[in-house]
Amino acid sequence: MYLPNFEQLFATIEELVMHHSPSGVETEIDKLLLRRFAELGVEVWQDSAGNVIAKIAGRDSSRAIAITGHKDEIGAIVKTIRSDGRVEVRKLGGAFPWVYGEGVVDLLGDRQTITGILSFGSRHVSHESPQKQQQESAPLTWENAWVETKCTASELEAAGIRAGTRVVVGKHRKKPLRLKDYIGSYTLDNKASVAILLVLAEVVKQPPVDIYLVASAKEEVGAIGALYFTMRQPLEALIALEICPLAPEYPIKDGSEPVLLSQDGYGIYDEGLNGELRRAAEKAGVSVQQAALAGFGSDASLALKFGHVARAACLGFPTQNTHGFEIAHLGALANCIRILEAYCQQLADAP
């Protein structure tokens, strides 16, 4: 059984976080994942939708399940470049400018990455300046923000910065932080789940059925990668690994206990599969929490909603500041691994 190693888990997440992967422009992390899975000795490939798929061959190859953790991250996308070189951006996925604050961002150009500053304007102003509203009455929106690069429009064009260029939190300020047994970082959603997939590729050996570990593409913009995969690969079950938001409206405790979802914004999960995961948790000696969420979706709930799978579940880890500088207990990630390892071993008894 998997023995938790917080130092190794933190190091793996840190490596993943420091590889940019905004939705649809995920090449940087793709190269890393293809190498890491190959080093673990599992079959690995990338499909036409951009998913990185690792397969652990089972004793019965006529049956299969999949476990997903999306590899893309939220951020911004360039809308236009002004004549003075300032870059106007809009959200990519569920990103808010006030969450990031003024600070370093990376613009992933076709030929060069340009570093800039997400900017909101000066504070020492009167009501004659539009920034005054953000101080007193109006929420900050992407329309009020811009990226300052100090490059000319022609220099940005030479770097391949254009409408559609992805913008993410800069590596200058992206490095994760250890807080006792917690990790604080941008993009734990969902780099921490991808780290779980890498550990599963190492610890799950000769399962009863084929196991597909899917680092899915473009989840933050509609679970595009997972829908493509599940439309083509017959599965008995799909389990999504995700963050689980900590908020007063949900009965979720912070700490090391993972969370099983019964419902999210796209529909209900399969209670039979949830029961199997609870039994696997009991076998692994792990307590789990239950929750029903709003304003949330996963690879699994979207695949279930569109009829691509008959049974789906979502296993998450409690997370503060979701879609911001997120904080999660490393023990919750380790316990997700233990549950899924036990689940993969008991699949011979599943219908």
Image (cartoon, rainbow, N blue to C red):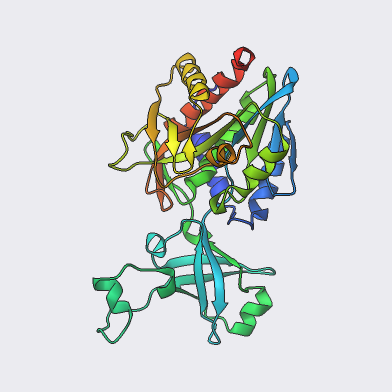
Q: Residue at x 55, y 73 (%)?
A: 79
The percent position of residue 331, horizontal first and vertical second, equals 43, 30
The percent position of residue 64, horizontal first and vertical second, equals 69, 26
Task: Kindly indicate the quadrant of the structure image that contains residue 256.
Answer: top left
Task: Kindly indicate the quadrant of the structure image that contains residue 78.
Answer: bottom right
Closer to us: 173 or 213: 213
- Position of residue 264 relative to residue 139, above or below, is above
Image quarter of the N terminus = top right
- Position of residue 142 relative to residue 5, above or below, is below
Q: Residue at x 48, y 16 (%)?
A: 279
Drawn side of residue 142 relative to residue 21, left or right: left
Task: Kindly indicate the quadrant of the structure image that contains residue 102.
Answer: bottom left
Q: Residue at x 37, y 49 (%)?
A: 321
In the rendered image, the residue lying farthest to the top is: 349
Closer to us: 122 or 304: 304
Drawn side of residue 208 relative to residue 74, left or right: right
Image quarter of the C terminus = top right
- Does the image show residue 161? yes
Q: Residue at x 63, y 74 (%)?
A: 162
- Position of residue 232 relative to residue 285, above or below, is below
- Does the image show residue 256? no
The percent position of residue 62, horizontal first and vertical second, equals 75, 22
Drawn side of residue 25 relative to residue 124, left or right: right
Drawn side of residue 106 relative to residue 322, left or right: right
Count of numbered tags: 0
Closer to us: 163 or 307: 307
The percent position of residue 97, horizontal first and vertical second, equals 41, 64
